[in-house]
Image (cartoon, helix red, strand yellow):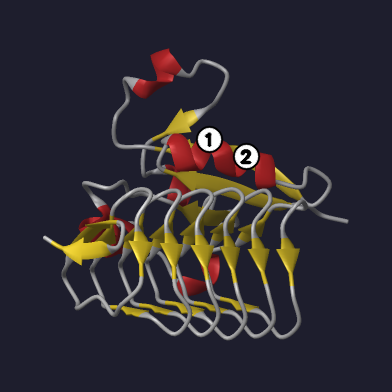
Amino acid sequence: MTRKKLLIFPCNGNGIEALDCVDDAEVEFIGFIDDDASKAAHYPQYKIYGRSALASFPEAYVLAVPGSPTSYPERGKFIASLGIEENRFISLVHPGAHLGRSVTIGRNCLIMAGVVLTSNVRIGNHVCILPNTVVHHDSSVGDLTLIGCNVAVAGGVSLGANCYIGSGSNIMNGVSVGNQSLIGMGSNVTRNIPEKSKAYGNPARVH
């Protein structure tokens, strides 16, 4: 069987952790794409290419996982700047993740170790979910959203597009979090959060 070739953009924490989700029997990791050439000195164990690698390896799939609590609003722009067709994006799911019945996962998603997605969960495109997070039944996660580790998303929750959900947060059943919102680490979200909000605390309040 021919293995799929893979490039990861950029060489950041999410990208390095994504390597744990690669099944070497099915996927051949070629290297990272990054605009910062100096990273090659910090990570000599990896091949780090410029964007020209997208043309040099036209058969390679791409996993694009930029974003942090400060840069998450620009994730869509960073990913679009690669200028590649949608069918080149690949999703990776760690073998230690658990997917329930009727779960759907979009393009260019990264689902890390210990993540549990229970029945009827819907994950959009360009979503990253860090280790040991649980998303319960009938919840949805919008495009471009990042979810930290050890987050509990109860049933029937709607997380909007381009959100950042900090590690250790809990989101109560039936709650909606509006597009482009940030939930601070360790927050307990018990009510709907409007779009473009920053909310944190116990219970979480918009600040």
Residue 58 badge: none
In front here: 170 or 71? Answer: 170
- Mark 2 surroundings: few (<14), some (14-19) or many (≥20) residues within 10 A: some
**Residue 43, image x, y percentages:** 48, 19
In the image, what residue type sits under mark 1?
Ile
- In the image, what residue occupies the spot 37% across and 67% down? 144
Quadrant of image for the C terminus: bottom left
**Residue 48, image x, y percentages:** 46, 30
- In the image, what residue occupies the spot 20% across and 64% down? 205
- Mark 1 surroundings: few (<14), some (14-19) or many (≥20) residues within 10 A: some
Q: Is residue 141 left or right of residue 180?
A: right
Q: From the image, tell me which residue sits under label 1.
A: 16
Can residue 66 be seen from the camera position used here?
yes
- In the image, what residue occupies the spot 58% across and 86% down? 138
**Residue 1, image x, y percentages:** 88, 56
Callout 1 secondary element: helix
In front here: 57 or 87? Answer: 87
Can residue 31 be seen from the camera position used here?
no
Q: From the image, tell me which residue sits under label 2.
A: 19
**Residue 127, image x, y percentages:** 46, 64
In front here: 164 or 107? Answer: 164
Residue 155, placed above or below residue 83: below
Q: Is residue 185 left or right of residue 44?
A: left
Q: Is residue 140 left or right of residue 116?
A: left
- In the image, what residue occupies the spot 26% across and 60% down? 182
Residue 155, placed above or below residue 6: below
Gap in Å between the C-alphas at discs 2 and 1?
Answer: 6 Å
Callout 2 secondary element: helix
Query: Looking at this rendering, what residue extends furthest in the front direction?
Result: 202
- Circles 2 and 1: CB distance less than 8 Å? yes
In the image, what residue type sits under mark 2?
Leu
